[in-house]
Image (cartoon, rainbow, N blue to C red):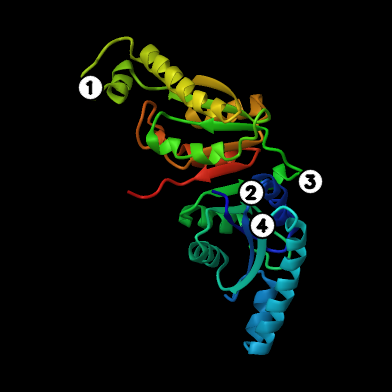
Amino acid sequence: MYTKIVIPLDGSELAEGVLPHIVEVIRDRESQVHLLTVAQVARGTASVLTDLLSSSNTREERRHVEQELSTYLRKIAGGLEPVAAKVQVGVRFGRPAEEILTFAGEIGADLIAMSTHGRSGISRWVFGSVTDRVLHGALCPLLLVRTESLQPAVAYQRILVPLDGSETAEQVLPYANALIRPNYTRIFLISVLPNGFSDRTVTLLTSSPPGLQLSTTALPKAEVQLTAYLRSVAAALRERGATVQTTVRKGSPAEEILAHAAENEVDLISMTAHGFSGVSRWVYGNVAGKVLQGAHCPILLVRPPAK
């Protein structure tokens, strides 16, 4: 886990802001880091490199561009070599999002780490668009760092992990586990009972078999179930050396997650992209998407494998 990491860069300081986060992720690991940049070749973009390549398609010109970008990446690599087992650089030509996804698949990456914006620099990818395409196409987890949260140094001391009681949501736990530093890391487990559901609806969601246990105490019962569930998850995390706090809230899942993150000043939110089953059934809203849009800290987003 976190052994093969792809970091797409476009030459901008904003895109490079993900680098301190990678230093934290690969600390004390034998991680291979792959720095990647993509020279766009499609016309009609704002890229200086695009204009350069469009004016001349000779192998010499392409080699010149590749050399220039490789020099840039090697300079960045020098800062990561002391903490990584190996740092490799790669230059590709094409559409950034497609090339990032193809490269990640080719090397079997287990993490793509990138900023969510990068509007200046060598290739001017307009990172919001690129990140969105990578987000929807990646098969491995993504570490997404908003430009507002860029820092010269990073420490994932306070990590928020939202869970909805489903096995799907729990697939984030190994990735959160791997970031625990004994006697240092504090993990906040949160689950949210969505508002706007009747007792009957909650009962249908929580009973087994569904719908056979109708009662007027469904909401309190669901809260008790979630509390017990989070405590069981917390016990396993404490064995890894983390301090763990559990919370059950009521309301809009995304809003409550963001509020809890702000209240506890967390350094990272770690969650799955979907939760298709379980007590609270967050599938009723695009929770991960809303959290990604509203969070002011980095997000480690794990996409469950397709079934």
Q: Position of residue 37 (x, y in %)?
A: 64, 67
In the image: residue 34, left or right of residue 284: right
In 3D space, how far apart are the residues under numbered discs 1 and 2 (Cα atoms)?
A: 48 Å
Task: Name the residue that disc number 2 marks.
Answer: 29
Amino acid bearing label 4: Ala
Q: Would you call the spot at circle 1 few (<14 residues within 10 Å), some (14-19), or many (20 or more)?
A: some
Q: Position of residue 52 (x, y in %)?
A: 69, 80
Mark 3 or 1: in front is 3
In 3D space, how far apart are the residues under numbered discs 2 and 4 (Cα atoms)?
A: 8 Å
Amino acid bearing label 2: Arg
Whether residue 259 can be seen here: no
The residue tagged with tag 2: helix, strand or loop?
A: loop
Task: Name the residue that disc number 3 marks.
Answer: 152
Task: Name the residue that disc number 4 marks.
Answer: 85
Mark 1 or 4: in front is 4
Q: Would you call the spot at circle 4 few (<14 residues within 10 Å), some (14-19), or many (20 or more)?
A: some
Q: Position of residue 125 (x, y in %)?
A: 64, 63
